[in-house]
Image: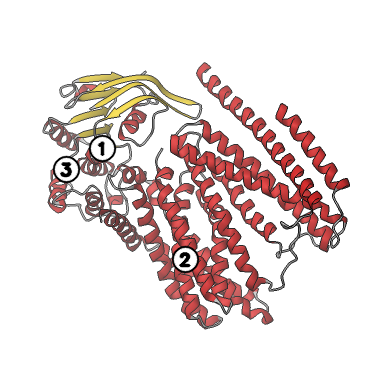
Amino acid sequence: MLLSAAALVILGAGVGLALLWAPEDADQGPTQRIFYIHVPVALTAYALLGWGAWKALRLLWTREERYDLESYTGVHIGLIFALLTLVTGSIWARASWGVWWDWRERQLVLFLILFLFYSAYFMLRYSLEPGPARGRISAVYALVGVVLIPVSFLAVRLAEQFLHPTPLIRRGGPDMAGSMLATFSVCLAGMLALAGALYANELAGKRLDARLRELREVLS
Amino acid sequence: MTYLRDAAALARKDLLLELRGKETVPAMVLFVVAVFVAFRFALPEEQEGAAGGLLWVAIVLTALLGLVRAFVPEREQGVLDALVLAPCDRSAIWLGKALSVLAFLLIAEAAALPVFAVFFEPVDAATVGAVLLADVGLCGVGALLAAMAVAGRAREVLLPLLFLPLAIPVVIGGVGATVTDDPARYLGFLALYDAIFAILAWATFEYVVTE
Amino acid sequence: MIQARALSKRYGAKRVFEGLDLDVPEGGFVLVTGPNGSGKTTLLRLVAGLAAPTAGRLEVAADRARIGFLAHEPLVYRELSALQNLDLYGRLYRVPERRERIGMLLERFGLWEARREPVSSFSRGMQQRLALCRAFLHDPDLLLLDEPFNALDDAGAALLDGELAGMGGRTFLVATHDPARLAPLATATLALA
């Protein structure tokens, strides 16, 4: 509860700062402000998928069942944030260049691959009977995914060479002005807090579900 | 090393099965040629240079065809239990399967690449090198995924979904080697892909087949 | 050889059994009885190491090389021949003098004539005999047999009786719905609810 409230506050502050306080970008104008949402969402997605992979590793290492749900929830919220990354990135592309999609945008292409991969995670999971095998196989898949992230990143960069030699202007790089950095940090913190709140919420719900099913089994 | 002997015994078993059944390799060869013909009609006149890229889609799909059948005898007849029970390293099961699918894929490509050269454009050394490297990566990662897919329901539908996102970097590496003037860096990338995913598959296969 | 304390197994929400205690000494011949679904097969799989316990302790003093397992399915490749199947398992289990041992077992179980035929041409009884060959191939110390007399005709059953009688000193855990048949050999019986 506290985390949800904190998330709302921080995120609300972040969005407010992004819209009102941060300086306007000279090149891109007001549409650049989407950066303050898009990039934190992307970073949060990475964090969640990494968290899911870490819990997967713990499951394989210790065999403790609780890690299965923790890994699953991490991947689930991570997938949602990956989808949000694609959506916000698409909106930004539309606002900046008038197209809903641009293959030159590395982040977008990378997230598309990851979105496909992690969507398949759920298809895999639903095809398996509940039990320790489902947890282990899902965990291995989550680990494969986290290895795929840097490999795909490298691949997408290499693909640029032959797909479209014209380079894309990098935006919102590390050389941000102080106020931009401050706004960005607040938004990032807000996104992470939001992700944490959603994670805790879903995990608690899933645990309750599992407990109920167990009790029903015992009673029948 | 007994590990390699175990993997060899398992790969040999798959080759024996294929010799008896003769289902997989002929299907793969026919499939890849059919895909080429479909490509010819899919490419308008000016875009014939795109054939190089389409070769790679054909290879990935053909590899997928081989992989879909990969663990089917083991799961359908429950034999996987007996293999898991054997004293050998469980990852030897992965290696044996990857090697046999690799063999099938290489045989299919030995027929397909000349056909491609006749239908579209000649195949240079960089492409052949890329094909070999790509095959290793696709079969390595594919054998792991095939074992996962075959554990559940709807396995024929599931494996393509699991496999294709992982095949995209391989397509990038392969196409880069075929169409650019700097194939070395793409070949290097393919080798890196192979090494990373082979190690990952080798390390995690045990967890996929045991409880 | 086998020791279990408070052993429990469930798959998701489905409980198979709970709080099971088991002691099988070396050389023991223990029968596991119970109706369908009581967990006989699951217990054998747990002891073999094909499944992991949900709770409780299980200790098996034999590694994979020393365990022989007979399941409901014969666990052989139907498109290969009996000889090819046993050759594969012989290699994986590093059976010394593989050819001789395979030949001897095939002959003992009356499969020598059909050794080069694909298993798909075998009757169910012959497949069961081949499965027994597979289980006994590497001369295991611990045998886990799930309904070994399944599908065997009188001749096959007599062969198996003879084999089992001659395998003294080894440890057996046998799931069966016909305990009377094996009663003479049994040292104990475990009845699952």
Please name the residue shown 26% across and 21% down the image: C23
Proximity of marks 2 and 1: CB atoms separated by less than 8 Å: no
Task: Indicate the position of residue A28 as horizontal and vertical percent values.
Answer: 84, 60
Q: Quadrant of residue A102?
A: bottom right
Do the residues marked 3 and 2 share a common chain?
no
Q: What residue does disc 1 label?
A: C63
Do the residues marked 3 and 1 share a common chain?
yes
Do the residues marked 2 and 1 share a common chain?
no
Q: Quadrant of residue B35?
A: bottom right
Residue type at mark 2? Ala
Relative to residue B87, is residue A95 depicted above or below?
below
Lower position in the chain sequence, tag 3 or tag 1: 1
* Residue B115 located left or right of residue C92: right
* Residue A187 located left or right of residue C64: right
Q: Tag on residue B191? A: 2
Q: Secondary structure at mark 3?
A: loop
Return the chain for callout 3. C
* Residue B155 located left or right of residue B106: right
The residues bearing labels 3 and 2 have C-alpha atoms spaced at a distance of 51 Å
